[in-house]
Image (cartoon, rainbow, N blue to C red):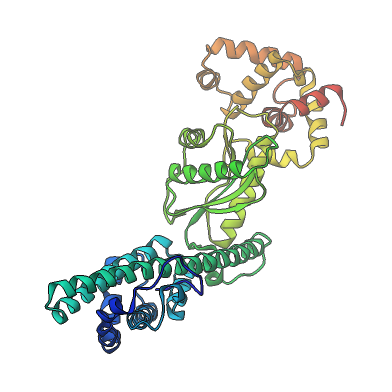
Amino acid sequence: MGATKGRARDVASPPGSALAEIAFLSSELESQASALAAQLAEFLVEEIPELPRDADMVRQLARSVEGNLVLAAAIYRGEIGIEEITAPEDASEYARRLARRGVPATALVRAYRLGQSFHLTWAVGEIVEARPDPARALEAVRTLLRLNFHYIDAVSERVIEDFQAERDRWLGHRRTLRVEILEQILHGQPVASATAEDALGLSLRQHHMGCVLWTPDEENSTATLVELEAAASRLGEAVGASGAPLIWPKGQNYLWVWLPLGRRFEAASQARTERALAAASPRVLAGLGVPAVGMVGLRRSHEEALAAAKVAAFGGGPRRQATFYAEPGVRTAALLAGDLAGTRRLVASSLGDLAASDEPAERLRETLRILLEEGGSYGATAERLYVHKNTVKYRVAKAIALRGRPLDDGRFELELALIACHWLGPTILAEAADGTT
């Protein structure tokens, strides 16, 4: 637990006569320091759940407490003035170890408050027993409180500074290591599972869903990144994530995310995902991969999320915030997007006049696409489009007329062309209609 290294404070130590009333505490503290330190360390670990309970950390906590008690004894003797208080090295070391363990600073602050209460209770008891005269006891207690509160103020402030400095250094190291491990995994390089799990802070023996989150505008700000991170957390809640998301910022408005889903999970619904993103921010868009297990699964789901995001960026699909790689047509559209010139030629040759970029042609193409998805069922197509079955028949007949040939003529290319038009949008259509590449 700690103090302020050589920093002058605007307070003066009590006069010698006042210190004389509590000087006897120094010998009592020194003789009982080890026992009191062990007792207080045990008490703090029991009272503060965030403090580590392993033997090594408990021993370091006891050394920290003992260092503070020995320093207090020197102050009570008048050997060290308030303005000269320095942090016991064991106290600073304990703070640094807590930072490296990811323990919150609030746990360290609480430890000092409880430690102060413990120490004052002991010291007041010693004063009452040694000073039967109430006036002398009161003066001793006043001196004790003055010294102790200035001491704790100096100690806790310095140790929190040590804690924060170590935490910043440790987090920087962790981020660097995490990026290195992720790059190795994403490039298919061999990484030991234990090493990867330690660096990433998650178990690889579970399903992970790769996600790509971004905002379509070019604004680059810290606020945008915070917005994306909030969306990642909301998304994790929506899909039932078993822990915090693994996040890798790739710019101020672009985020790679992995959501841990445990060994068993329920597939996320489109509606629930959309609600989560909308609640975080209506600006945030997402591409989502298929959950998979292990390092290979981590990489594969990420690649799928990138592919879904690429398709969504064309703006040709449904107007919504989330695009799933597992959706019908998205996987195919991602492949088609890899060769836009070839895809434009395919659309032009397969659709003919049906490749027009106007709204009537789009309605006919969509009807035809859903009819083929439904295995040629006019009834199922009508249900999905919320129209009468005869309307579907009329649209299909008109689409065939515009195309200039029956559905079975080049059926496979026709389905690919309709998927490309649906997901990849206006650019594909406009250039296909012009016959350009």
Residue 46 appears in view = no
Residue 150 occupies which quadrant of the picture? bottom left
Above/below status of 422 relative to 21: above
Where is residue 130? Give x, y as percent: 16, 82
Picture coordinates of residue 317 (x, y %)? 64, 29
15, 430: nearer the viewer: 15
Q: Nearer the viewer, residue 214 or 186?
A: 214
- Residue 262: image quadrant is bottom left
Q: Is residue 126 left or right of residue 158?
A: left
Give x and y (percent) for residue 422.
67, 28
**Whether residue 260 is situated above or below residue 403 in the rendered picture:** below
Residue at 59% x, 51% y is 301
What x and y, as percent, mark residue 375? 58, 28
**Residue in the foreground of this view, choosing between 288 and 285:** 285
**Exactly how many numbered labels are in the figure?**
0
Instruction: Please tell me which residue lies in front, 28 or 363.
Output: 28
**Quadrant location of the N terminus in the rendered image:** bottom left
Residue at image point 55% right, 47% down: 290
Specify whether residue 261 is in view.
yes
In the rendered view of the protein, which quadrant contains the C terminus?
top right
Q: Is residue 41 left or right of residue 391?
A: left
Compared to residue 140, the image places residue 291 above or below, namely above
